[in-house]
Every structure is written in C-alpha cells, then in structure tokens.
Image (cartoon, rainbow, N blue to C red):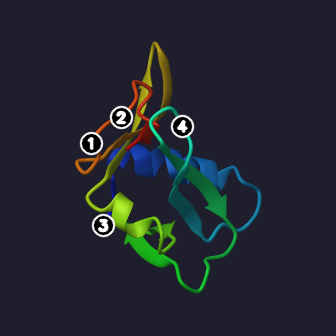
Amino acid sequence: MIQLTENAIGAVSRFIESAGKPIAGLRIKVEGGGCSGLQYGMKLEESAADDDQVVDMGGLKILVDPASQPMLENVTVDFLDGLEGSGFKFENPNATNSCGCGKSFS
C-alpha cells in the first residue's frame, strides 16, 4: 500500500498538532482532474469512513477510500522543504504519465 517518508510523517504530524480539533487521520485520495487526468488529494479527517482502508504509520493513520486504493498501490509520499518552496511530492511507479508539479498523473 502507500508509504510516507519520515519527512512526510513529520509534516503531517505538525499539521495535526496545529489543527485545534481531534483528527482521526490523513485522507489520501485520487480524483479526476489535474493536468494529467488524475490528481492526488490530501485532507485531515475527523473520522474515518466505514469502508476506508486504515494504514498505521508510527501512530499516524492514513485513510484511503476503496476507489483510490488500487491507484495508490506502492506510492511513496515525501515532503520537500527547500528554497523553491515546500510541499508534498508523490512518487507513483504505476503512473504512465505525470506532470511537472508532481500532483497529477495518468
């Protein structure tokens, strides 16, 4: 299933700490859109859906809906922080095409 690097786990943990409300986990999903046809989405969730796959990564819960599960197989999420900006980067070995921003694929 999906993997997060230590940098990504640290960044998400910081966002959860500053959320000001209880958070059940980080939802990672795939939806239509972006410049390559599909795009990744991330959102802090207060509760998990009954049909979510829940992946525990050192206490951080990743929530994945059934439709997104096959498209997130073997995906690695990293968090980059540099002079040109910061953000999450997805590495998907299953993608046949991806855009320069790293947020959409096909």
* Alpha carbons under labels 3 and 4: distance apart: 23 Å
Label 2: state its secondary structure: loop
Splitting the image into 4 quarters, where does residue 47 fall?
bottom right
**Number of the label disc, if any, that sits on residue 8:** none
Q: Amino acid at mark 3?
A: Met
Q: Is residue 91 above or below residue 63?
A: above
Residue 100 pos. (x, y %): 39, 24
Q: Which residue is mark 4?
A: 34
**Circle 2 residues within 10 Å: few <14, some 14–19, many ≥20:** many
Q: Amino acid at mark 1?
A: Thr
* Alpha carbons under labels 2 and 4: distance apart: 10 Å
Label 1: state its secondary structure: loop
At 23% from the left and 48% from the top, the residue drawn is 93
Q: Which residue is mark 2?
A: 98
Upstream in sequence: badge 3 or badge 4: 3
Decide: marks 3, 1 in contact (CB < 8 A)?
no
Residue 34 pos. (x, y %): 54, 37
Q: In the rendered view, does 7 fall on the left or right side of 46?
A: left
Q: Which residue is mark 1?
A: 96
At 57% from the left and 47% from the top, the residue drawn is 14
Q: Residue furthest left?
A: 93
Decide: marks 3, 4 in contact (CB < 8 A)?
no
* Alpha carbons under labels 3 and 1: distance apart: 18 Å
* Alpha carbons under labels 2 and 1: distance apart: 7 Å
Q: Is residue 53 above or below residue 39?
A: below
Q: Which residue is mark 3?
A: 1
**Circle 1 residues within 10 Å: few <14, some 14–19, many ≥20:** few
Upstream in sequence: badge 2 or badge 4: 4
* Alpha carbons under labels 3 and 2: distance apart: 20 Å
Residue 63 pos. (x, y %): 51, 69
